[in-house]
Amino acid sequence: MIAPILATAGLAACSTKPAPNSGFLSSYADMQKRGGINEGASIQQRRDDAASDSVDSVFLEKAVFAPRVGEGLTETERSMVLREVDRQICFEVSERFAVVTTPTSKTATVRTAIVRFEATGRVGSVVSAASGFVVPVVTLRVPGSTGGLAVESELLEPGGGRQIAAISWARTAQVVGMDTPSLSRVGDALQMAEPMGDAVREAFATKARKEIKIPSPDPCAAYGPRRDIGRMAASMAVDSVTGLYFPEAAGTGPQKD
C-alpha cells in the first residue's frame, strides 16, 4: 500500500499551478508572482502602498463562487467553504484594518471569489490515513485524492471603487506533506482557508501598517471565537486517532440553527 504512494514523492516538489484569471477582479494589471515561502501556494498580487496606507476601515463583502465553480457540491458543502473563506479573511484582515458591518463612502471594500475548487477524494483519503500510521512524520496522500482551492480577492478604494490591492491565491494539497486527508469532499479546501486568509492580509496591508487591537464586540463574532481551544484539541484528538480531518470536530462543519 505504501510503496506506490512513496513512488510519487517527487510530486511533492511540484508547485501548485496558478488559477487562470477568472474575470472577477476589476483589474489584473501589474499582478506579480510573490516570492518567499508560500506554503506550496501559487500567489500573484499587486498593491498601491500609498493608497493602502490611507485606508482606515473596510467592509467585507461575502465571498461567492465564480460561475461554474463547485457546481457538483451540495448547498451545505458550498456554504461550509464560503463561510470558512469569509471567516479567515475577516479574522486576518481585521488584524490590520478596522472592519465595519455597514459600508459607507469612507470605507474601502473587499470582494472575494472562489475561482477554482478541487474536491478531496474520499476513498484515497482512507488509504492515506492508513499510511499515516506507518509513516507518521509526514502525511502521504494517494495521487488523485488531493483537493484544492483558488481564490481571487481585491481591496477597492472608498467612494470610486478603484482597485488598491489584489491577490490571486491557489493551492492544491501535496501528495507528500502535512495536508491531512478527509472523508469530506471539501476537507482540503476548508484546511486551506486559513493560509489563504493570511495571504490576503499580507497582500492588502503594507509592512508599515501595524497590528491593531481587536475591538469589543469583535467584528468577526458571527464566525465564532478566533481561537477555540476546545475545538482545536478535539480536532487534534480525532486526527491522532483516525488520521483524518473532520470538519465537525474542527468547527468548520455545517452550521446549526
Image: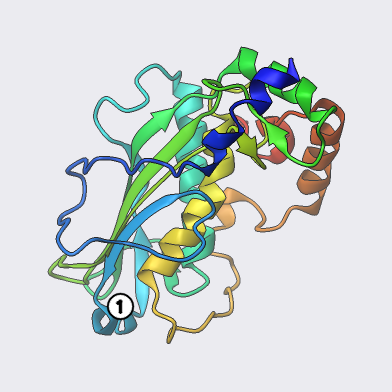
Placement of 139 over or under 76, stated as above or below? below
The colour style of the image is rainbow
**Residue 104, percent from left and from top:** 26, 68
Q: Residue at x 44, y 22 (%)?
A: 75
Q: Quadrant of the N terminus?
A: top right
* Front residue of 84 and 6: 6
Amino acid carrying mark 1 in the image: Ser
Image side of residue 52 versus residue 90, left or right: left
Q: Quadrant of residue 2?
A: top right
* Front residue of 165 and 30: 30
**Residue 22, percent from left and from top:** 21, 40
Placement of 105 over or under 77, stated as above or below? below
Image side of residue 116 versus residue 194, left or right: left
**Residue 97, percent from left and from top:** 43, 74
Placement of 195 over or under 240, stated as above or below? below
Q: Is residue 252 visible?
A: no
Q: Residue at x 41, y 65 (%)?
A: 35
Placement of 92 over or under 186, stated as above or below? below
Q: Residue at x 71, y 17 (%)?
A: 127
**Residue 187, percent from left and from top:** 59, 30
Q: Is residue 144 visible?
A: yes
Q: Quadrant of the C terminus?
A: top right
Q: Residue at x 82, y 26 (%)?
A: 242
Residue that mark 1 sits on: 52
Per the image, label 1 sits on a secondary structure element best described as: helix
Q: Quadrant of residue 227?
A: bottom right
- Neighbourhood count class around disc 1 (C-alpha, 10 Å): few under 14, some 14–19, many 20 upward: many
* Front residue of 83 and 164: 164
* Front residue of 140 and 81: 140
Image side of residue 25 versus residue 61, left or right: left
